[in-house]
Image (spheres, helix red, strand yellow):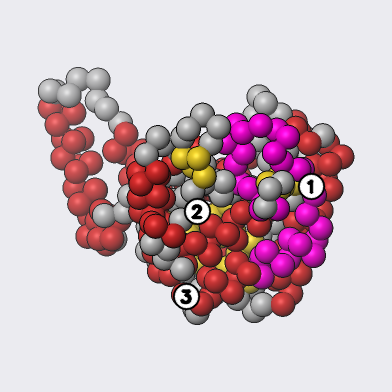
């Protein structure tokens, strides 16, 4: 196979078996975090929704680590009368301002728990293109279908990216001093900005991220973007939209992440869960037959044995919190 191998080496503490992880940022954080959660590994994945740009992500983390009371959450009434927050997704929109604040407050508490109780927090950066609300200058995470003339599009400089990430790091470390932070740049292409401006955007993210990694011992970099761009540099590794990595590409990047950051016991767990998951998903064609009944007994015993070795796996949520 003709490719350029990427050196994805670990520079911090390995991930120990059963330790909670937290994945925040772009939709690629969802893709990787979901694979972890499907293995019944304790993980918090974008509990307050996706944040593509580093400024909005830093604001969300600041809200979560500050444990804002619902009354302190900034909410706006839109042109059609609904209430929403410019820093969060449309799923919080409601005709009832108290309902919007309550649901946001609940998910911010999950975010605080994810940040404060995880051994490793993964930060995935999607774009450095942002929209400023003209009336305040605020960088918004979501325009909520408000009139286009209320916003100004701009490209964050590498300095602005690193400033946002520095604030993010300070807020996370303040509530979790022992945490390891792993930054990565999403390989998802934002073609709405055009190919050239997509590359300008990724360049600012890469420069900003490496500036922070160089300045903090607890901060590290995983080359998901580089693996996609160099090792898998072919359109067959993309989904049909030619923007997102294909399921196989996501699996390859995920496996590189596991091999780089997870310790031996953790990788053993993931391998055992994969085998057990295949066993659990099998459905006999003739469930009442003697052979099928013996299989069911073996399958149930294998599941029981697995949980006796990893009891925490029985309570881990395998569905997304996003």
Q: Closer to the camera, 5 or 60? A: 60
Q: Closer to the camera, 84 or 319? A: 84
Count up the numbered dots. 3
Please tell me how crowded label 1 is: few (under 14), some (14-19), or many (20+) other residues with Cα within 10 Å: few
In reply to whether residue 319 is colored magenta, the answer given is no
State the CA–CA distance, disc 3 to disc 2: 25 Å
The secondary structure type at the circle numbered 2 is loop
Q: Which mark is residue 176?
A: 3
Residue ID for mark 1: 154
Q: Which mark is residue 102?
A: none
State the CA–CA distance, disc 1 to disc 2: 23 Å
The secondary structure type at the circle numbered 3 is loop
Label 3 or label 1, whichever comes before in sequence order: 1
Q: Quadrant of residue 199?
A: top right
Residue ID for mark 2: 74
Evaluate if marks 3 and 2 touch, with contact meaning CB atoms under 8 Å apart. no
Where is residue 24 drawn, in percent x and y?
54, 55
Residue bounds of the magenta highlight: 137-166
The secondary structure type at the circle numbered 1 is strand
Label 3 or label 2, whichever comes before in sequence order: 2
In reply to whether residue 151 is colored magenta, the answer given is yes
Where is residue 89 drawn, in percent x and y?
52, 42
Q: On the rendered structure, is 146 left or right of 175? A: right
Q: Quadrant of residue 238?
A: top right
Q: Closer to the camera, 299 or 119? A: 119
Whether residue 218 is situated above or below residue 9 in the rendered picture: below
């Amino acid at each position: 196979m003709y490719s350029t191998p990427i050196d994805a080496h670990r520079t911090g503490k390995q991930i120990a078996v059963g330790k909670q992880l937290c994945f925040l940022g772009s939709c690629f954080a969802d893709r990787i975090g979901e694979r972890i959660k499907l293995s019944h590994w304790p993980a918090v994945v974008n509990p307050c929704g996706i944040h593509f740009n580093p400024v909005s992500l830093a604001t969300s983390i600041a809200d979560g680590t500050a444990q804002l009371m619902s009354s302190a959450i900034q909410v706006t009434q839109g042109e059609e009368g609904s209430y929403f927050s410019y820093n969060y997704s449309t799923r919080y929109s409601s005709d009832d301002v108290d309902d919007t604040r309550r649901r946001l407050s609940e998910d911010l508490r999950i975010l605080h728990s994810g940040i404060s109780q995880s051994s490793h927090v993964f930060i995935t950066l999607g774009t450095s293109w942002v929209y400023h609300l003209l009336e305040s200058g605020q960088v918004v995470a979501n325009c909520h279908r408000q009139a286009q003339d209320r916003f100004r599009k701009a490209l964050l400089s590498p300095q602005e990216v690193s400033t946002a990430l520095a604030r993010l790091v300070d807020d996370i470390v303040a509530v979790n001093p022992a945490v390891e932070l792993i930054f990565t740049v999403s390989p998802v292409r934002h073609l709405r900005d055009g190919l050239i401006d997509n590359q300008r955007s990724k360049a600012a993210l890469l420069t900003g991220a490496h500036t922070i990694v160089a300045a903090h011992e607890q901060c590290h970099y995983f080359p998901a973007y580089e693996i996609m761009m160099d090792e898998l540099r072919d359109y067959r590794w993309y989904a049909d939209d030619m923007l997102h990595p294909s399921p196989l590409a996501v699996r390859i990047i995920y496996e590189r992440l596991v091999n780089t950051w997870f310790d031996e016991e953790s990788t053993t767990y993931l391998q055992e869960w994969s085998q057990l998951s295949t066993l659990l998903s099998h459905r006999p064609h003739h469930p009442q037959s003697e052979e099928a009944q013996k299989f069911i007994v073996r399958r149930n015993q294998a599941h029981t044995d697995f949980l006796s070795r990893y009891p925490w796996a029985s309570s881990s949520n395998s569905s997304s919190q996003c």
